[in-house]
Amino acid sequence: MTIASPQALSSSTGTSESSAAAPENPNGELGKNAFLKLMVAQLQAQNPMDPANGNEFIAELAQFSQLEQTTNLAESSSKADAAGEVAQAVQLIGHKVSYTDPSSGEKSEGTVQNVEITASGATLTVEGVTGIEPTSITEVS
């Protein structure tokens, strides 16, 4: 089965696309919707006298479904890891900890007063010192 590019399809229909237009997919990633649009375009462009093998399309759909489920699992796992990190940080509130001070690199200790949750993860405030990464904690008592 031969698949024509979208430019070739549009030129065969008499329409033309401007080459100055910004690309729709600058990263070159094929998302769910783009994959399905491509598959529909393949089905529409096939020669009715020489139809494509249906098993090929079923195999492609199965691979796509497997990839989608793997992606969903990875996203869920990432979210669970982040939630676990936040839960561990919150459990440190009120506990005395020893840590490496991020500004001076010296060992310090104090009581965890606050947990701040940002896009990059949880950070602690220990005795007024903010931005302490939970990974810099060396001892909890």
Image (cartoon, rainbow, N blue to C red):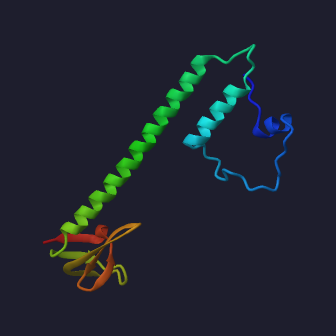
- Vertical placement of residue 108 versus 54, above or below: below
Q: Residue at x 39, y 43 (%)?
A: 73
Q: Residue at x 34, y 80 (%)?
A: 105
User: Is residue 20 or residue 97 the one in the foreground?
Assistant: 20
The N terminus lies in quadrant: top right
User: Is residue 110 or residue 54 the one in the foreground?
Assistant: 54
Q: Which residue is drawn at 54% across and 23% down?
A: 59
Q: Quadrant of residue 84?
A: bottom left
Where residue 67 appears, as percent x and y from the top left, is 48, 36
Where residue 134 appears, as percent x and y from the top left, is 29, 69
**97 relative position to 124: left or right:** left
User: Is residue 99 or residue 23 the one in the foreground?
Assistant: 23
Where residue 98 appears, as percent x and y from the top left, is 21, 76
The C terminus lies in quadrant: bottom left
Where residue 34 appears, as percent x and y from the top left, is 61, 41
- Vertical placement of residue 19 versus 67, above or below: below
In this view, which residue lies farthest toward the left?
141
How many numbered marks are there?
Answer: 0
- Vertical placement of residue 109 versus 15, above or below: below
Q: Residue at x 42, y 43 (%)?
A: 72
In this view, which residue lies farthest toward the bottom?
128
In this view, which residue lies farthest toward the top?
49
- Vertical placement of residue 108 versus 2, above or below: below
User: Is residue 44 or residue 83 the one in the foreground?
Assistant: 44
**11 relative position to 57: left or right:** right
